Amino acid sequence: MTAVWIRFRAELRSRGRAWLALALLAGLAGGLVVAVATASHRAATAYHRYLVASNSADAYVDPGFAFGGDESLDLGRIARLPEVADTQRTALLAVISRDRSGRPLYPVGPGAVQFFVPTDGRRRDTIDSPKLLRGRLPDPRRAGEALADSRGATALGVDVGGTVTLRVASHDTLWHHTAAFRLTADPRTATGGPLVTIRVVGVAASARSRVDGGLVRLTPAFYRVHGGPALGAFLLQLETRLNHHRADVRPFEADVRRIAGKRMYGFFEAGEGRLEVQRSVTLLARALRILAAVGGLAALLLVGQALVRQAALDARGQGTLRALGMTRRQLLALAAARAGAIALPAAALTAGLAFALSPLTPFGWARELEPDPGFAFDAPVIGAGAAVVLGTVLLVGLAGGAWVMGEPSRRSRAPGPAVSALARAGLPPAIGAGLRMALFRRGRVSSVPVRTTLAAAILAVGVAVTALTFAASLQHLLHTPRLYGQTWDFEIAGGGPPLEPAFVRRLVRDRALRDVATGLVGPVVVGGRTTGAYAMDDVKGALPPEVLQGRAPRAPDEIMLGAKTASRLHVDVGARVAFRSGNGRARLRVVGVGVVPATKWGKLGEGVALPFRALERIQPEVQANAAEIRLAPGAGRSAGLARLRALADGPSTAVVPSDVANFGGVAGMPFFIAAVFVAAAAAALAHALITSIRHRRRDVAVLKTLGFTSTQVLVTIGWQATTIAAVGLLAGIPLGVGVGRFTWALFAQDLGAVPEAITPIGPTALVVPAAVLLANLVAVLPARAAAATQPAVVLRAE
């Protein structure tokens, strides 16, 4: 192989800069793609690693005011159960507070803030310990210091150093003088408990779902100084770590149920309640994977073509080398050496760039939860990415060299019927030439890539329309609550005391309210798994759930399953499922499959809906404490919602699920991806046009030899670009609409929402002039270069 080595060293001296430029191009493209892939992997695992680092609870037991008004459950006995490894007690205080603008804050609903205080005297949280973002942890000996998570700080309108004034209801006020406790009151003038001011000394990561809202952690000193058990609490929370974690949850739940008997309480399995957070972060990770895949494909197309062109240039002297005695195997070895000279530095740059960009990742919510921020060498992802770049550059370079080596000399082909028809159409010479150059392929080795150019144009338009369709369908979902199961305008489902009959009568008599349903939203067990249930009876009009198959449940033995719950249980309409609530059990008939809104016991599409009277029959001690309300047509929405907030002393507790509202805290992620898709499509179309026009230098030279003026050459190139864009539009728009609607249907079904796709007529129509304008703008510089072509120089080179 001495001849190969001698030739390679000679080429390295003469072409080393070109190879280095290609290596830099491939390395930069590969590094960016691998960095996005690394961000995806880091985001997907951030929440799990956060839970491990924070020593997260496995289950929560929550008796108290919010669960029927029973504080007699023996939490000490529960803490001594054999499954329990460690416990911690906190209380969710009943607090009247306002944000910096004077808006009342509530413990439930959009923008909710909950104030927790430890009640067991521990100086620091050992279970669900916070991750500090800025500031410091509060001193447990100081009653006036507090730690807010990022969502709580945003809702309060404060940061480190900010103060908040609170009126904490006393136990007596909350339990015996409930009417005197109004969350909409001014904390400074309200009575019934101590007025305190706290200072936020630190902000922590928010690891709670949108259903739970923001969190403010108070100190043990606060609890001690302001009355301890004399403070009113919505619930008393026992946070538990189990010996065998999730494996012990079911036995632990059974023991808690046995101890509780007929007492009302809440039981939350952490693995279920945190699904919404993980789901939101997972969607971000998926979006980043899609972005990495699209970026990788674009990089392969752009860098691959550059590598093939370089291989063709490097192989120009192969005839001379063959004449000097080099065999085909030696020529292939030389091609491999050239590819290796590009691949090795490209792979090294890929790994180095991905590592250098790692401090910028992950994004959004995952970045806040990341327990180990900063530089991170994700060996599996970065190693695999560098290996893919190395292998791809080697294969493309070697394949390009082999292809050029195996091609016979260029030869022309007879024009096809389409080109002949154009010739007979009597078009002006410049237009006819432009159409021929866009659609007619000449030769092989140095041929114009007509098919790949047209395919690139079709794919570019298709990708752009697909992205627009997906983004429009997402926007439609965000603005249509019915699609994610909320068929009402206002929801009261905070787990508070039972609804008073007088309050329900006021709702029924109110002419501005068309439909009212009352009942309960809470955890039940269906098919052996805990999930959320909407148990509602219509008291005015009708508020049926969003049904996909079958019908809404009406009889006491009927139930509707969320689409994802039905899929997980492998049941369909007509089947019966095991149902348990409290100590009551029944087998209910599935009469429908539909969309159930997200709860803290299950994500969107999970859960069940059934009549409240069916739940009463199974668990007689339950009481209605929730309501769903729909405004009458024509009633002023803003005024109606304001009246309901005043009447209910709180906001609507309905929240847009994190799955729908944002991608792991990056709300604009789908639109960013759509913009990247459109930009990638435009780049692909531009690259295809430039490549095609540059390959037509010989044709332009022939046209100028035949008498074409510079203006006619410009018109010819313009019609070539317009024709390519037109073909892309004719085939790409229907392709993009179909793919976009199909992709959205899969995505919506995976979310658990109604798969209702939207085709954006306006933006899609704008693709037509945009593509034509882009094609002609891209063609300007190559067209001017073509107009200045010197025929003698080009034809002599040919």
Image (cartoon, grey):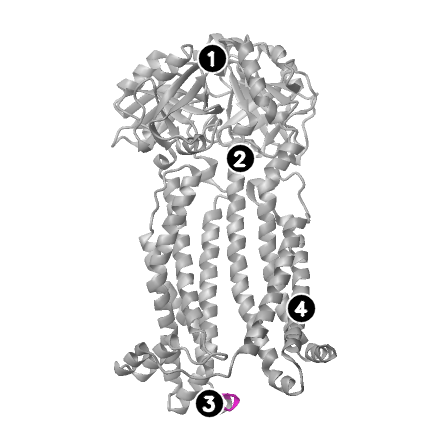
Task: Locate residue 659, reporting x and y percent.
Answer: 47, 38
Residue position marked by numbered label 2 in the rendering: 277
Give, as a three-letter code, the residue at label 4: Gly
- Residue 529 forms part of the magenta stretch: no
Residue 623 visible in the displayed image = no
Q: Earlier in the sequence, mark 2 or mark 1?
A: 2
In the image, which residues are magenta?
Answer: 794-798
Q: At x 29% / y 82%, what residue is drawn?
A: 423
Residue position marked by numbered label 4 in the rendering: 340
Label at residue 583: 1
Q: At x 64% / y 57%, what residue is drawn?
A: 386
Q: Where, by quadrant of the figure, is residue 347 drawn?
A: bottom right
**Number of residues whose C-alpha sits closer than 10 Å to that of mark 2, classed few (under 14), some (14–19) or many (20 or more):** many
Q: Nearer the viewer, mark 1 or mark 3?
A: 1
Label at residue 449: none
Q: Is residue 330 left or right of residue 656?
A: right
Q: Where, by quadrant of the figure, is residue 507 drawn?
A: top left
